[in-house]
Image (spheres, rainbow, N blue to C red):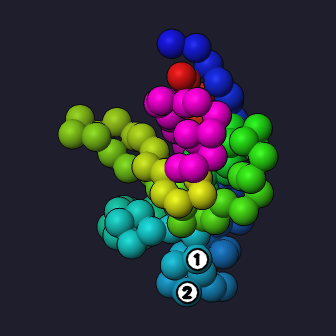
Amino acid sequence: MNAVAVGIDLVDVARVGRMIVRHGDRGLRRVLTSAERSYCLGRVRPEQHVAVRLAAKEAAYKALQNAGTARKVGWLEIEVVQDGDGRPGLRLHGRADAAFRRLGATQALLSLTHTSSSAGAVVVLVG
C-alpha cells in the first residue's frame, strides 16, 4: 500500500452552530446527505457532528485535488459513513469517485476528531 494523496482540515464548531441556526435544514441539505443529516441531528450536540463531517469532506476534497477535475466535486459527492464497528469511512459518489479512481487510489482512510470547539479530519488515499 502506497499513499497516493493526503488532505487535512479543521472546522470551528461554533461557526457551524451559527450556520445551522441561520440556514436550518435547507443549509444542511446542501452539504450533508440524508443519512449524514439523520445521524447528526440525532446527537446531543449536532453542530459537533456536522462540523467533523464538513472537515472530512474538505480533507477528502484536498486529497482529490491532484486528480485535476476535483474542483467540480460537490459536498454531497463525499459522504462520511460508519462501518459495522462504528469506525468512520468515506463513500465517494460521482465526480469524487471518478477523481479517486483517476488517482489510482483503492482505499480512503479517514480519521476524525472533535472537541467542544474544533473538529478535524485527515484523509489518506492509498493505492
Residue 102 is covered by the magenta coloring: yes
Answer with left or right where residue 17 lies relative to residue 40: right
Q: Which mark is residue 7?
A: none
Where is residue 5? Give x, y as percent. 68, 28
Label 1 packing within 10 angstroms: few (<14), some (14-19), many (20+):
few
Query: Disc 2 on helix, strand or loop?
Result: helix
Amino acid type of the residue tagged 1 in the rendering = Arg
Q: Residue at x 77, y 57 (%)?
A: 71
Answer with left or right where residue 75 lies relative to residue 93: right
Q: Which residue is mark 2?
A: 26
Amino acid type of the residue tagged 2 in the rendering = Arg
Query: Disc 1 on helix, strand or loop?
Result: helix
Q: Quadrant of residue 14?
A: bottom right
* Residue 117 visible in this rendered orientation of the protein: no
Name the residue nearer the viewer: 123 or 51.
123
Q: Please state, as top left, top right, bottom left or bottom right, where the C terminus lies in the image.
A: top right
Mark 1 → mark 2, Cα distance in angstroms: 7 Å
Name the residue nearer the viewer: 73 or 29.
73
Q: Residue at x 52, y 78 (%)?
A: 29
Question: Is residue 7 positioned above or below 57 on the image?
Answer: above
In magenta, the rendered stretch is 97-120
* Residue occupying the far left of the picture: 84
Label 2 packing within 10 angstroms: few (<14), some (14-19), many (20+):
few
Answer with left or right where residue 114 lies relative to residue 45: right
* Residue 124 visible in this rendered orientation of the protein: yes
Q: Which residue is mark 1?
A: 30
Q: Residue at x 58, y 77 (%)?
A: 30
